[in-house]
């Protein structure tokens, strides 16, 4: 996670395809 001076946040997420499909990946990001 990277925090910027303006208050923005950048979250880099790397997932293997067999570990998480698109829906669960989206759910993870939305619930973060």
Image (tube, grey):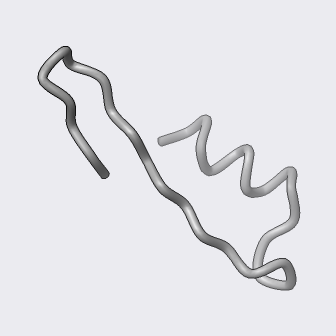
Q: Nearer the viewer, residue 26 or 12?
A: 12
In the figure, is residue 11 to the left or right of 17? Answer: left
- Vertical arrangement, residue 6 with respect to residue 25, above or below: above
Q: Nearer the viewer, residue 9 or 22?
A: 9
- Vertical arrangement, residue 21 with respect to residue 3, above or below: below
- Vertical arrangement, residue 8 with respect to residue 20, above or below: above
Q: Residue 22, image x and y in percent? A: 86, 55
Q: Nearer the viewer, residue 6 or 25?
A: 6
Q: Where, by quadrant of the figure, is residue 17 drawn?
A: bottom right
Q: How many marks?
A: 0
Q: Residue furthest left?
A: 5
Tell me which residue sits at (62%, 50%) in the image.
28
Q: Residue 2, image x and y in percent? A: 27, 46
Q: Where, by quadrant of the figure, is residue 31 drawn?
A: top right
Tell me which residue sits at (87%, 65%) in the image.
21
In the figure, is residue 20 to the left or right of 5? Answer: right
- Vertical arrangement, residue 18 with respect to residue 6, above or below: below
In the figure, is residue 10 to the left or right of 27? Answer: left
Tell me which residue sits at (30%, 23%) in the image.
8
Q: Residue 18, image x and y in percent? A: 86, 84
In the figure, is residue 6 to the left or right of 24? Answer: left
Q: Residue furthest top?
A: 6
Q: Residue furthest front?
A: 5
């Amino acid at each position: 996670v990277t925090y910027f001076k303006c208050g923005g946040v950048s979250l880099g997420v790397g997932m293997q395809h067999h570990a998480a499909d698109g829906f669960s990946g989206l759910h993870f990001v939305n619930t973060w």
